Amino acid sequence: MNRRPAPSFACVVRVRDLTKTFGPPGRETIAVKNVSLAVAPGERVLLLGPSGSGKTTLLTLMAGLLAPTSGSVELFGRDVSTMHPRALQSLRAAAIGFVFQTFRLIDSLTALENVLLVLHFAGRPRAEARRRALVLLDRLGVAHLAGKRPRALSQGEKQRVAVARALANDPPLLVADEPTANLDSACGLEVARLLGEAAAEGRRSLVVTSHDERLARHADRVLRLADGLLYEEGVPRTRRRLHSTP
Amino acid sequence: MNALRTLLDQRLRLALTVGGVALCVVLMLFLWSVYEGVRVGSVEYVRASDADLWVLQRHTTNILRGTSILPEAQGAVLRDLPGVASASPVLFLMAGIERGDAASTLYVTGFDPSTGVGGPPRLVAGRRPETEGEIVLDRAFALKSDLAVGDEVRMGDVTLGVTGLSTGTNMFVIQYAFTTLAQAQALAGLPGTVSTWLVGLDEGADAEAVAATIRSTFGVEAYDHATFVANNVREMESGFLPLLLAVAVLGAIVLAAILSLILSVNVLERRFDFAVMKALGAPAFFVPGLVVRQALWIVSMGLAAALLLFFPLLAGLEAAAPEIEARTTLLQIVVVAVGVAGIGLVASLLPIERVRRIYALEVFR
């Protein structure tokens, strides 16, 4: 995966005073409250928190999939609230790679076609898309499964295909929602390593939500969420120690 | 590819759906083919006649559902009118026919055997009646009644020998039969009467002017050939078409309901797949396009199955009920195919609305 040129924007994602509530007025549930953060190009951010803490809501807000109740979201320097839905869809297709908690591979498509799908959404020419998809599957060690349907794959294989799909358009931003939640311990750590490597090799930004503290070793920054509040931000101890080593 | 593969994932359901679509298409094609058969059979006699003008009793516009009694003596005066080359008498009557214990009603047509004008439009067996005591039957009627050339039938106390079989004379609910004018008059008990005059004009004669002269001279109706054909077609359509249309529309509604239901089920089953596509940045028309493609695949497979089924089914039906004389053309098949594709598109609207209400966020549940 080639290193991308230096981006023209200072932050891949920047959110300011972000609040999201659900429910009718007077009986709202606050999912995210007054959150501000910025993700720099190439930065790996881990959103840690228990179930219901608001981390998935924050992730979908940051990816432009959900409109905030108040506050603003900028993706690659553009305020998403001012973007036409079609432009936002194109931006998502080309610039954001998604990895979902339950893989969310499409069962009626083969592994290769699952990867081709996002290349098709981004308007890549067919032959080029096919080459790219096969290269990615090969790098992730699942090229031999290209013609298999997801139901014929193991959990770990599915997640590798899902990662290949996320990387298909060489996006500057990867977002992953609980990518290890449905995997056993070894598989989970393997996927975390793959995502970390993909981000590092491609100088991509990576935003991962999880409740698994062990993923912190693959992050540059860890944010903790509880009840919609971002209450801690910092460099994980392991990395801090590495950084402080002469 | 994805649209078809999704359908193929549920093979039994797809087979049942395609079967339902095929049966609806067969129904529509069958109704139209029967209609065409009736349309041709009902007016072929009029259409095939050589008459330039049709003369009938006042206020009578057609021979399918009208009464016309004219004196045979008019013929001599009619033939002397300027522009008239010939005037051939024809008498129509509904008459019961018996053979053994079976009884049926025929539209008996008496014509002048010396000219042949007003006789059967096409014979497929035997010859025209030449004297009293002879009759030509419609081929479908003969098949249904197990009659052939050389057999005898009874009309009241009169016995008639079957001399020939005709086609283009099947009106579905009743069939033409042909006998001599004298025999028809005897059967009706109305000597010296005719129903219509089939008038041939001199070359260069003005048809409208001659028709006007005939109207004013006898106080009757006189129609040129094209108008009279149109009158009969309209009469036939007014009696038959609404029923067929009602059944065809019912078939179309059933077809739309089947398609819409099955597409909606597919959408509900693949809800998360569609949500994933939206989250991954699928263009606005991509997901609705999948639904439309599924509809068109089902319709295409249904049409193919219908065409495979239709002709053998029709042949079987015509063998069992010879009075059903269907006519199927390529144009009918094309129009039904386009119509069914249109129904498929309309049936996609409801599932597309369901797709519209699927949100990318559902992926994160």
Image (cartoon, coloured by chain):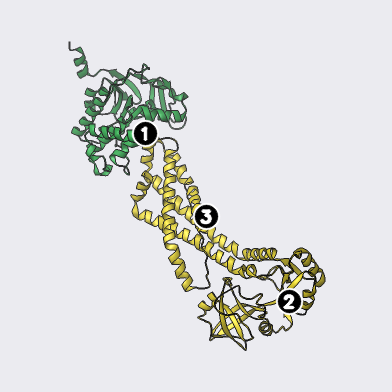
Chain colours: A green, B yellow
Crowding at label 1, few (<14), some or many (≥20) Cα neighbours within 10 Å? few
The residue type indicated by label 3 comes to: Val
- Examine the image and state in which quarter residue B39 appears: bottom right
Q: Nearer the viewer, residue A217 or B94?
A: B94
Labels 1 and 2 share a subunit: no
Front of the two marks 1 and 2 = 1
Labels 1 and 3 share a subunit: no
Which circle marks residue A245 in the picture? none
Residue sitting at x 36%, y 44%: B2
Left or right of A227 in this view: B189: right
Residue picked out by circle 3? B335
Residue sitting at x 73%, y 71%: B55
For mark 3, name the chain: B
The residue type indicated by label 1 comes to: Pro
How far apart are the alpha carbons under marks 1 and 2?
79 Å
How far apart are the alpha carbons under marks 3 and 2?
43 Å
Which circle marks residue A125 in the picture? 1
Residue sitting at x 44%, y 58%: B22
Q: Position of residue B301 (x, y in %)?
A: 41, 54
Q: For mark 2, give the secondary structure.
A: loop
Q: Point out the residue furthest to the front here.
A: B203
Residue picked out by circle 2? B69
Q: Point out the residue furthest to the top here.
A: A246
